[in-house]
Amino acid sequence: GENVEQHPSTLSVQEGDSAVIKCTYSDSASNYFPWYKQELGKGPQLIIDIRSNVGEKKDQRIAVTLNKTAKHFSLHITETQPEDSAVYFCAASKNTGFQKLVFGTGTRLLVSP
Amino acid sequence: GAVVSQHPSRVICKSGTSVKIECRSLDFQATTMFWYRQFPKQSLMLMATSNEGSKATYEQGVEKDKFLINHASLTLSTLTVTSAHPEDSSFYICSAKPGQTNEKLFFGSGTQLSVL
């Protein structure tokens, strides 16, 4: 089955810096890659997603890139703010069956003022 | 985005009792809902896939008689933890997809279960 690895597990940056989180997946049939932000004691919130027919997608300060050949995708956050501090999860799914999402292990991002 | 409501947000119960958690899609119909479990500082582990009008599909290692799932309507799925024990204490999160062909998955706010 699909296996998603995520790095780093923790990331500390200064306010205004950029943050990059990377994920790799194992199943070449996976074609949908969302990113979720989870704050303490809350459910994950979808922040951006990308499909395999697209190499890059941007939404204001957040961008995601996908390299299908290498089977990895990354989340880029620019001009980080303290409110960006949270745990970020990447995930992957393929267009078969129930399209179950397989999650990465999470990255705890801390943005210091 | 689509809104998924989960209730209760927190529950404390005695060992041996059963607890029901509700998951509702508020502004869309969800043929499929998913139930996850999350331990502190860990990732989300899929427990089961809930389909409206049919039996749930459980992941390997998840006891179906322990975690009863009912998806009686297109907007409501429930998870009942039966005869709860302290090891069942965890953060349970539901999610739903607005449409069978739409990959986007939206999550509820989670339920923190503590079994004494």
Image (cartoon, rainbow, N blue to C red):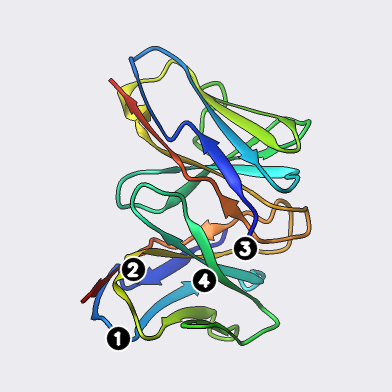
Q: CA distance from mark 1 to mark 3?
A: 32 Å
Q: Secondary structure at mark 4?
A: strand
**Quadrant into which the N terminus of chain A falls:** bottom right
Residue highlighted by disc 3: A93
Residue highlighted by disc 2: A83
Q: Residue A45's x, y, as percent?
A: 50, 59
Q: Residue at x 30, y 87 (%)?
A: A17
Q: Are marks 1 and 2 on the same chain?
A: yes
- Mark 1 or 3 closer to N-term? 1
Whether residue B64 sits left or right of residue B56 in the image: it is left
- Mark 4 or 2 closer to N-term? 4
Whether residue B105 sits left or right of residue A79 in the image: it is right
Q: Are marks 1 and 4 on the same chain?
A: yes
**Position of B89 relative to A28 (above/below):** above
Mark 3, Cα crowd under 10 Å, few <14 / some 14-19 / many 20+, is many
- Mark 1 or 2 closer to N-term? 1
Instruction: Please state which of the two labelled residues, at mark 4 or mark 2, is closer to the viewer.
Output: 2
Q: Residue at x 31, y 67 (%)?
A: A85
Mark 1, Cα crowd under 10 Å, few <14 / some 14-19 / many 20+, is some
Q: CA distance from mark 1 to mark 4?
A: 30 Å
Q: Amino acid at mark 2?
A: Glu
Residue B32 position by quadrant? top right
Q: Amino acid at mark 4?
A: Tyr
Q: CA distance from mark 1 to mark 2?
A: 12 Å
Tell whether label 2 touches label 3 (CB within 8 Å). no
Check residue A16 in the rendering and tell me which mark sits there, or answer none: 1
Q: Residue A67's x, y, as percent?
A: 56, 86
Residue highlighted by disc 4: A25
